[in-house]
């Protein structure tokens, strides 16, 4: 900081002159004029400082004013885009009857390629023009407690008016568009040269739960490069699966954990998982119930490193007033072992968010070193947490739809969103290729998926993209969305139909790299026969492509591979 008697001179600015069509130079803006006056001023005393302060206040007001105007203009632009897309889709073709022209189009008559599967007990259903599933096959393993089901087919892509030039160049294909909810519609068959992306998928289901599952997520055991899948449910079991062999390698029961079941789980270090017990309403929670449970992971034998040993450890001391509702890790290096671990927790009664610093030894937590409270300002229970590593901030979602961003070191509130609707935030997930993009899922009847650009701020702006499926039933906050590892596809599990005639087991897919993804119907497929609750992806390893892992009320764990 320079003393007042020796104020540091401002750097010289280069004037950029923009020529108009008539050849005359454009007039400088008011900001340029003010800066020129300040730079030309020879007075370096208190009056010069006052001029600088006045200029700063003036242009700060102008910046805030135009920022709000830009937000309103962006909302109006998105609304006009949606209305234009609907008008173009509703416009009949010029060749007369739209259904007749569609039925005569060669591209509409082309059948999508179907992956070949062999098996003695396969049931194949041929696809007609209005159908959405090409092949379904089921294989039941007799004399075993595990049931493996295989479902393969082609997901009908949504027609797009924006050409995808990001990674595959210009694509020109035609296919059927599936509308939801309701039966297949003849007018839904569209044949036009639009940018589409057809997805081939193959799903294998394995019986893994006795009761309804909660979620599944990927983890690394002992610094191994190949990821594992951790699945847990209301039967109290915690299981580790190998996504490549699709075999359960280790598990803990509710007796091992000492609780009924885990409400939420996360990985906090290369060999430690953290989970919070079932949330109990009122004061019926037993005083002996732990506040948080740690599960240590370690390969027991050098000649059999694929097997992971699991050992539970309870912790009763918590900075929260009341129960913990959600837990999240803060990032770690799978290859680097450290004696320090960090985690985030959100409360139900106190509505607070805490950052924990833990001392660890191997696969055990020794003690709590320190806790830091985030001044998030939530008035309802915390339902979702995640950590943004670049800016070292904590993102928290609450039961009233509010999202907050806090600085980890100081706990200061950086920004927060308004309550767009009274719907609980189910999950908060950062884009794997750009941590400035935040994906949230909400428990509502429409626009369940909301994407924020954290660089624009979330205090005054609405989400950059709002996606969803209009359903008669309100979605559950336990339905958790996910990014595909390529950073473009967004997956969301939802419950379709009504309570009397449900249409469950569906997953919606949006490609956010298209500008009109929020104006189009999502692409749908059914990896399960009942409600899907959670989606996660394994990373690509060697020649293996990413695998989508789902848990469903059919008590199965699903492994889905994609091909485009």
Image: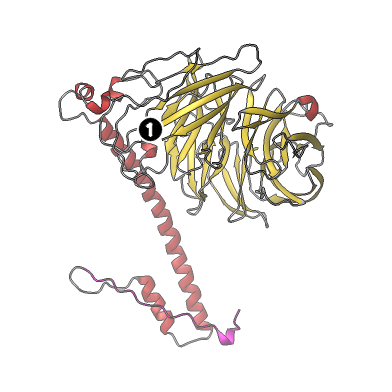
Find residue 521 and report its image quarter: top left
Viewer can see residue 336: yes
Which residue occupies 16% across, 30% down?
94
Find residue 253 and report its image quarter: top right
Is 101 situated above or below 51? Answer: above
- x and y percentages locating residue 57 in the rendered image: 48, 68
Quarter of the C terminus within the rendering: top left
Relative placement, left or right, of 172 versus 421 is left
- x and y percentages locating residue 543 in the rendered image: 52, 40
Q: Secondary structure at mark 1?
A: loop
- x and y percentages locating residue 453 in the rendered image: 48, 49
User: What range of the chain is rendered magenta?
Assistant: 1-20
Residue that carries the numbered disc 1 in the rendered image:
198
Relative placement, left or right, of 178 versus 206 is left
426 is within the stretch colored magenta: no
Q: Main secondary structure of the magenta part?
A: loop
């Amino acid at each position: 900081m320079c003393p007042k008697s020796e104020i540091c001179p401002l750097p010289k600015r280069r004037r950029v002159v923009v020529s108009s069509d008539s050849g005359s130079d454009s007039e400088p803006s008011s900001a340029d004029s003010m800066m020129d006056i300040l730079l030309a001023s020879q007075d370096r005393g208190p009056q010069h400082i006052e001029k600088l302060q006045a200029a700063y206040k003036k242009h700060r007001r102008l910046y805030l004013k135009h920022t709000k105007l830009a937000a309103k203009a962006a909302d109006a632009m998105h609304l006009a885009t949606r209305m234009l897309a609907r008008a173009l889709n509703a416009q009949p073709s010029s060749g007369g009857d739209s259904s007749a022209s569609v039925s005569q189009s060669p591209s509409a008559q082309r059948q999508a390629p179907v992956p070949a599967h062999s098996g003695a007990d396969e049931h194949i259903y041929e696809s007609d023009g209005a159908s959405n599933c090409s092949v379904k096959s089921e294989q039941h393993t007799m004399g075993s407690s595990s049931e493996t089901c295989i479902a393969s087919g082609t997901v009908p892509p949504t027609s797009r008016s924006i050409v995808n030039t990001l990674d595959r160049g210009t694509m020109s294909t035609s296919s059927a568009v599936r509308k939801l909810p309701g039966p297949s519609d003849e007018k839904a068959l569209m044949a036009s040269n639009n940018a589409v992306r057809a997805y081939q998928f193959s799903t294998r289901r394995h019986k893994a739960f006795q009761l309804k599952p909660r979620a599944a997520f990927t983890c690394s055991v002992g610094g191994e490069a190949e990821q594992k899948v951790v699945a847990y449910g209301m039967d109290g079991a915690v299981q580790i699966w190998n996504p490549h062999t699709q075999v359960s390698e280790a598990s803990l029961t509710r007796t091992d954990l000492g609780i009924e079941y885990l409400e939420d789980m996360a990985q906090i270090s290369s060999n430690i998982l953290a989970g919070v017990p079932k949330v109990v309403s009122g004061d019926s929670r037993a005083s002996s119930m732990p506040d948080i449970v740690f599960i240590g992971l370690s390969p027991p034998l050098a000649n059999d490193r694929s097997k992971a040993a699991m050992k539970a450890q309870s912790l009763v001391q918590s900075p929260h007033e009341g129960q913990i509702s959600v837990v999240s890790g803060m990032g770690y290096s799978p290859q680097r072992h450290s004696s320090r671990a960090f985690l985030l927790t959100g409360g139900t009664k106190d509505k607070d968010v805490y950052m924990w610093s833990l001392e660890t030894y191997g696969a055990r937590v020794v003690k709590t070193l320190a806790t830091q409270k985030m001044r998030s300002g939530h008035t309802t229970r915390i339902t979702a947490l995640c950590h943004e590593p670049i800016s070292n901030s904590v993102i928290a979602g609450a039961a009233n739809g509010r999202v907050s961003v806090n600085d980890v070191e100081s706990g200061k509130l950086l920004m927060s969103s308004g309550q767009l609707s009274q719907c609980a935030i189910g999950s908060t997930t950062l884009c794997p290729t750009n941590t400035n993009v935040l994906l949230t899922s909400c428990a509502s009847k429409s626009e369940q998926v909301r994407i924020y650009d954290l660089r624009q701020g979330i205090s005054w702006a609405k989400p950059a993209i709002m996606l969803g499926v209009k359903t008669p039933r309100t979605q559950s906050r336990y339905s958790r969305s996910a990014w595909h590892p390529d950073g473009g596809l967004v997956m969301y599990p939802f419950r379709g139909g009504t309570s009397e005639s449900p249409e469950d087991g569906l997953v919606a897919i949006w490609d956010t790299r298209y500008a009109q993804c929020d104006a189009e119907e999502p692409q749908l497929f059914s990896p399960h026969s009942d409600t899907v609750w959670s989606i996660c992806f394994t990373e690509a390893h060697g020649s293996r492509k990413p695998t989508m892992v789902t848990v469903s009320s059919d008590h199965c764990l699903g492994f889905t591979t994609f091909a485009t």
